[in-house]
Amino acid sequence: MRRVITFSIAFCAAATVSLAAGDATAGKTVFASSCQSCHGPDGSGNPNIAKMMKVEMRPLGSPEVQAQSDDDFKGIITNGKGKMPKKANVTGKDQEDVIASLRTLKK
């Protein structure tokens, strides 16, 4: 009986962690509508936007970008960074999903 209870607790804990993580597939949809115009479909950046804004856009899959924490990404989405405006329409679960999608770009 003790093993059953221990297994049940471990299973529930694992399920909770899985639910807390974002959905990369859903994140790709949000990314496409809210981020892709500047960051490009593959996260490598839109060179025309970078040139127009006179900024360097690091690929989102680069080690420098991927080294940022999920909280860093949330802050950038919420508050913007440099010339990147905040994305007020990307909140809550959508943020988690976009971050999960960004993590799939890791090189």
Image (cartoon, grey):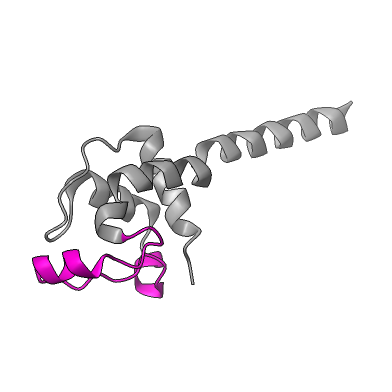
Q: Is residue 65 left or right of residue 83?
A: right
Q: Main secondary structure of the magenta part?
A: loop
Q: Visible in this render: residue 23?
A: no
Name which residue lies at 85% across and 29% down: 4
Q: Nearer the viewer, residue 3 or 41?
A: 41
- Position above or below: 101 against 12: below
Q: Is residue 22 left or right of residue 91?
A: right
Name which residue lies at 80% across and 28% down: 5
User: What residue range appears in magenta?
Assistant: 40-67
- The percent position of residue 15, horizontal first and vertical second, equals 64, 35
User: How many numbered marks have been drawn onto this rendered protein structure?
Assistant: 0
Residue 50 is covered by the magenta coloring:
yes
- The percent position of residue 37, horizontal first and vertical second, equals 26, 54
Q: Is residue 52 left or right of residue 7?
A: left
Q: Visible in this render: residue 58?
A: yes
Name which residue lies at 72% across and 35% down: 11
- Outermost residue to the right: 1
Name which residue lies at 58% across and 40% down: 17
Q: Is residue 58 left or right of residue 16?
A: left
Question: Could you say which quadrant of the image residue 57 lies in?
Answer: bottom left
